Image: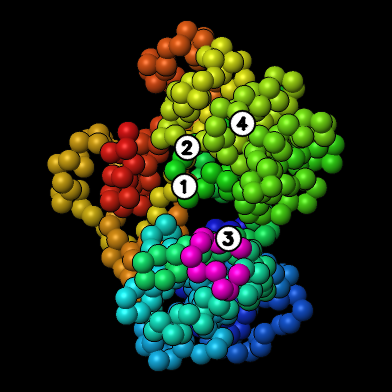
Amino acid sequence: MNIDTINNNIIKLFNSEQAWFFKVIPYELINDSVKILCFSSQMPNQDELEVLLNKTVIFEKVEEKQLIELLNKYYRIKVDKTNILSTNINKISTDFFEQLLEESISLGASDIHLEPSEKWAKVRFRIDGKLIERNTLDLYKYAELINRIKIKSNLDISEKRLPQDGRILTEVNSIKLDLRISIIPSLNGEKIVLRLLGTNAEHLDLNKLGFTTTNLESYLIGTKKNNGIILISGPTGSGKTTTLYATLKMLNKPDVNIMTIEDPVEYTLNGITQVQVKESIGLTFAASLRSFLRQDPDIIMIGEIRDKETAELAIRASLTGHLVLSTIHTNSAWGTINRLKDMGIAPFLISDTLNTSVAQRLIRTLCPVCKQRILENDLDIQIRNYFNKDDKLQLYKPVGCEQCYYTGYYGRKAIYEVINVDHTIKSLIKQDDTSGNVNAATFNTLQDNALAMFKDGITSWEEVYTILISK
């Protein structure tokens, strides 16, 4: 039973309201029967469901937490335009903050932006990497909301001149949330950004992140080594940390000592020692890494290599028999090598320690309900030039419907560029010659993988083009 990739035609047996009302998810059709997931502690009315579907219903019991996560994944709650989150600023009630979080979860938002202007404040959600405005507040209600958030995150409500950072641990629809709060003074008042972090990494799986078979095989070669450095690069919000957590989950064994230093800690991993950066008291990446080396670790994860000192300590750790995983800000897997050189790391040290370099991006996937087929005859000449005449194309474009909130997209998928640093590449790095690396190596680039997604009808040309022009 693969409940992580349920066919869209089966999902459409229920609409969002029906699925949430009965607390069920259909996942398999067998002739005139349908298998349905339900709470292990509470069975829905079978007769009602069979009348609704005109099929025989077979129940499969799952834990409540798992079912709620799947409901949030497959059935985004359609928000009533007259509810608390409508654009009518006169209908804001005292439980606005709770309902704000409920809607953000139902929409799959990663961040909530609360931004004041001269006459009102607006609420925007970042959904699938894009900001979408949801409603407006009058400034009086906005001030109340700021104070409530400050109190919940143990911040100073009287301080309005300096930036403040806080944290709220809460639970919404049986989903535990770790909210990271950032408040900064602006011309029209305080702006707040809430980052929504999950606290459970059980759902993370390297096989489901977007690796192609070839890329995954190359990546796993690096994770099986006892020492060396694995670096994942990409812009902010490209899923680097998620890939690291999925890797740590795979490597987490009773006979392995894993330690992480992060800013912030995004998921809780049982059996792993996780440390939160606190630069205000001197607990930096570099300071923590020095202490880690005295804790007898097998694997070390550093949230980000930001400077030469951290890079040098990571290299030292790898040279002394540790497997080190981290992220770095570059545009490509090859750019990672040049970035380390720019930090002042000698080429021979990079060659001796770097075993895998990965670059990744997140691409929005088209809504399966409303995406529209593009005929090859209608393709722009610029687009045709990227494909061969013999290519079998299934191209689609975004349209927009109620299911995807009229964006044309539903969810995101990662694409990867993986370089396994073999003897040939090590030799080129030592010679301080990376100009010929792309020709010397055989791997699929980010651009190759993005075009493959467009060719297979998974995403749009607009999403792919942003990857192509960044080459």
Q: Identify which amino acid the numbered label 4 is placed on.
A: Thr
- Estimate the x, y position of residue 374 in percent, counting from the top left: 23, 55
Q: In the image, what residue occupies the spot 47% across and 47% down?
A: 236
- In the rendered structure, which segment of residues is drawn in magenta? 156-166
Evaluate whether residue 193 shows in this view. Answer: no
Q: In whole angstroms, how far apart are the C-alphas of marks 1 and 3?
A: 19 Å
Q: Nearer the viewer, mark 4 or mark 1?
A: 4
- Depth check: give the residue in front, 270 or 140: 140
Q: In whole angstroms, how far apart are the C-alphas of marks 4 and 1?
A: 19 Å
Image quarter of the C terminus:
top left
Q: Colour scheme of this structure image?
A: rainbow
Q: Identify which amino acid the numbered label 3 is placed on.
A: Asp
How dense is the environment of label 4, judged by Cα within 10 Å: few (below 14), some, or many (20 and up)? many
Q: In the image, what residue occupies the spot 37% across and 71% down?
A: 188
Q: Which residue is mark 3?
A: 165
Q: Which residue is mark 2?
A: 329
Q: Earlier in the sequence, mark 2 or mark 1?
A: 1
Q: In whole angstroms, how far apart are the C-alphas of marks 2 and 4?
A: 14 Å
SS under mark 2? loop
Q: In the image, what residue occupies the spot 20% across and 36% down?
A: 385
Rendered image quadrant of residue 44:
bottom right
Tags 2 and 1 touching, CB below 8 Å = yes
Disc assigned to residue 236: 1
